[in-house]
Amino acid sequence: MSKDQIISGSTILGIEFGSTRIKSILIDKDHNVIASGSHEWENDYVDGIWTYSEEAIMNGLRSSYADLKKDVFSRYQVPLKKLGGLGISAMMHGYLPFDAGMNLLVPFRTWRNTITGEAAEKLTSLFSFNMPQRWSLSHLYQAILNGEAHVEKIDFLTTLAGWIHFLLTGEKVLGVGDASGMMPIDSATCDYDAAMVAAFDNLVADHGYAWTLKSILPKVLCAGEEAGRLTSEGAALLDPDGDLEPGCPLCPPEGDAGTGMAATNSVRERTGNVSAGTSIFSMIVLEKPMSKVYPEIDIVTTPAGKQVGMVHCNSCTSDINAWVSLFREFTDLMGCSTNIGDVFTKLFLKSREAEQDCGGLVNFNYLAGEPVTGLSEGRPMFLRLPDARFNLANFMRAQIYASMETLKYGMEIMNREHVAIDCVYGHGGLFKTEGVAQNDLAAAIHAPVTVMETAGEGGAWGIALLADFMVNRAEDEALEDYLQNHVFSGMKQITVAPDPENEKGFDRYMERFVSCLPAQKAAASEFKD
């Protein structure tokens, strides 16, 4: 069956540029993953900027696709030549300005940078709308405030997903979810907020730029619309071997937040998801607007344009990974051979034996700044009271709490706003060990958390579903209905409700966490190279 679909060219390909991996997934007509490929990479810190080089981006794209091709041939003994549809997703936000020849004017400034504080604050005041530092418009305005010479040469401004999509199709478009991480969206029109576009143009009018904001932004498309077709140049970029045929349709390119919503069936009001990897963020689809502007909560949209409250935190699993690596180095020193997956599983399960407030331990996993708690820089930091119960179980639970403590700090605002949440879906590597991070997250956000059997597939599967929706949906079928009726109906899932004692313990831990924020700020200020 899968082999026949590959030969006929009816399979769907999704590619997502994550922060540590570029993943390619091929799905069949039943939305099953039938082949996959990946490429590991890491961001660079160059001249005070978190970035990925153009070479790394292009090499990573080709490497991930080549790995997928190899997997297809290994499984089915046929080459991958033709696709029924294709979708591109990537880390949201950041800054990718191009000149008229589509030459990148400055190195890619990723979501991880916290260098646009002045611009974000002024735009928030101008729009009466929270403008996070990582959003593309904040980066653009900061470049203007800095007097950067490249700004006058800008002909096109997009995201990483939008750039890759352009290279494959020649189309300067963006899915509405990804566009909502560039600048505010009017959900009624599924386009950039016209009043805010005009306000920005007036703000920078005295600079005399040849461009207006709308002229340099991608065209906004909603889920289900066709966003171009794979060109010969695009096919050659993906597959230098020349096997891949051009012509397949592409869905609107989306950000990792939107694909996370699709991959977890959380695009309907009163649902949400938490994506937990290098960064962690929650997406709650709102029934009604928030009562006021909160700097801790971003307002973005689903791939269909519905309003979403988002709490985005820059750090999640990186600090846990570092500690687990240290423990594994010790086991190697002792002459014990270990499997990294087993080490993670055993340590996560050990955390279940801990006190629910971590026994007087507090951990900051801040490898970067965290605007939610007001930090432009971060320093990983572990603290304990002199009489703390410092044992392995408490230590590991503190590490897991740390992965979501800043998220909880922001989500408490939604709790006070009485935002209705029926269920939150968890996905990403943090949830691989059953019954651990899922239970702690439910306690953190005071809502049931569901993990599905597809939780590990992530955004590459999500963008493949959006491409499938474009190709196969019925006329006027809504995205939430398509996902529920055709993809997730009958899927195995595990739901846990928040445990009241765990909630109380996490709240006590958070009291200590908040009390230690001044120490974290001092460390960020004083502890330098």
Image: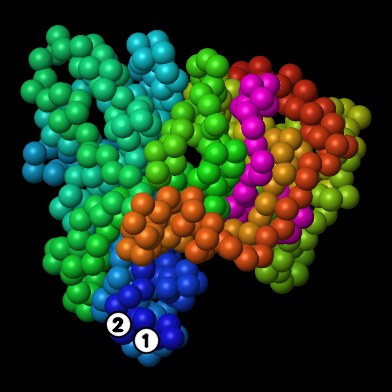
Dot 1: what SS? helix
Any magenta on residue 131? no
Quarter of the image holding residue 41? bottom left
Quadrant of the drawing holding the N terminus: bottom left
In the picture as drawn, the residue positioned furthest to the front comes out as: 475
Residue 214 x, y percent position in the rendering: 19, 28
Which range is magenta? Answer: 409-438
| Rendered residue at 66%/55% (across/down) | 451
In the displayed structure image, the side of residue 510 where residue 488 appears, left or right: left
Q: Residue at x 37, y 86 (%)?
A: 4
Please say if 270 is above or below 116: below
| Residue 442 seen in render | yes
Which residue type carries mark 2? Ser
What amino acid type should be assigned to the residue bearing mark 1? Answer: Asp
Dot 1, how many residues are within 10 Å of its Cα: few (below 14), some (14-19), or many (20+)?
Answer: few
In the image: residue 177, left or right of residue 281: left
Q: Residue at x 71, y 66 (%)?
A: 342
Which of the pair 171/31 is nearer the observer?
Answer: 31
Q: Secondary structure at mark 2?
A: helix
Total marks placed: 2
**Residue in the picture at 60% in, 20% down:** 521
Q: Are marks 2 and 1 in contact (CB under 8 Å)?
A: yes
Q: Is residue 433 magenta?
A: yes
Q: Which residue is mark 2?
A: 8
Coloring scheme used: rainbow
**Res. 122 in view:** no
The image's mark for residue 4 is 1
Which residue is at the front of the view, 121 or 412?
412
